[in-house]
Image: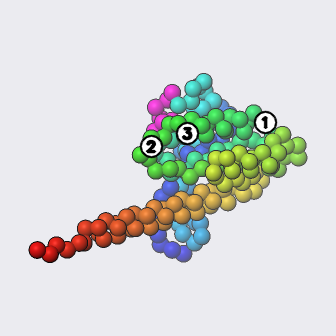
Amino acid sequence: MALMMFNVQLLVIVDYRPGIQSRILNEEFVVDSEICDLEIMDRWSAFEETAVWPAHEQNYTDICNCDAIIFVYTIGSPNSLEDAARVHHVSLSTRRKDQAESVFLLVGNKCDLEDRETPLDEGILVADRWGCDYIETSAKTGKNVEEMFAIVVRRLRLAKKEKALAEEKSRKRHRKSNSGCIIA
């Protein structure tokens, strides 16, 4: 197991736990043999309680400071995906242009249901439009719950590597352009 720690702050917007106040969980996961500390914030109840979700300053702060946002909707409710889309729109409009982009994941929950209201293809189509991954889970049975977090961690690790490579390229270009010689 690698000794490297990878800290991730996730904003999870889930609609299947109405009435529960926003909460923060700290969990340690092992993804691809590397330890990862996840700070998981569930903010759906804050969205449900207000007509204009981002009116609460804490929600702005959470969106601006998180590394990833997981949008969870219930496949048993057609309105649930629409709600997730509204929150996705808010998250895009809330972030400042100078901020690093968050990793998004769209999750269709309750895949254990026999009678689904939202077709699988619809969830995949929405995720494609958002430029993110899609997975279906069941909180009841635990199906794909750990995989959901693993997908996010892998995407964040990849983004971190790509950013480091881009910064290194930029430094090399800058050094090259400043390494000229003057002959008098």
Residue at left 59%, top 57%?
152
Task: Work out whether 154 lies above or below 79.
Answer: below
Residue at left 85%, top 43%?
116
Q: Judge from the rendering whether residue 105 lies leftward or rightward of residue 102; answer left or right.
A: right
Residue at left 47%, top 72%?
3
Q: Residue furthest left?
A: 184
Which residue carries the number 2 mark?
Answer: 97
Residue 57 within the magenta-colored segment of the rendering:
yes
Under circle 2, the secondary element is loop
* Three-letter code, disc 3: Ser
Mark 1 near mark 3, Cβ–Cβ under 8 Å? no
Q: Dividing the picture into quarters, in which one does residue 31 lie?
A: bottom right
Q: Nearer the viewer, mark 3 or mark 2?
A: 2
Question: For the residue carrying disc 1, how many other residues have a C-alpha within 10 Å: few (<14), some (14-19), or many (20+)?
Answer: some
Q: Nearer the viewer, residue 157 or 7?
A: 157
Under circle 3, the secondary element is helix
Q: Which mark is residue 78?
A: 1
* Three-letter code, disc 2: Lys
Mark 3 near mark 2, Cβ–Cβ under 8 Å? no
Which residue carries the number 3 mark?
Answer: 91
Segment colored magenta: 55-61
Q: Position of residue 40 (x, y in %)?
A: 55, 49
Residue 7 within the magenta-colored segment of the rendering:
no
Under circle 1, the secondary element is helix
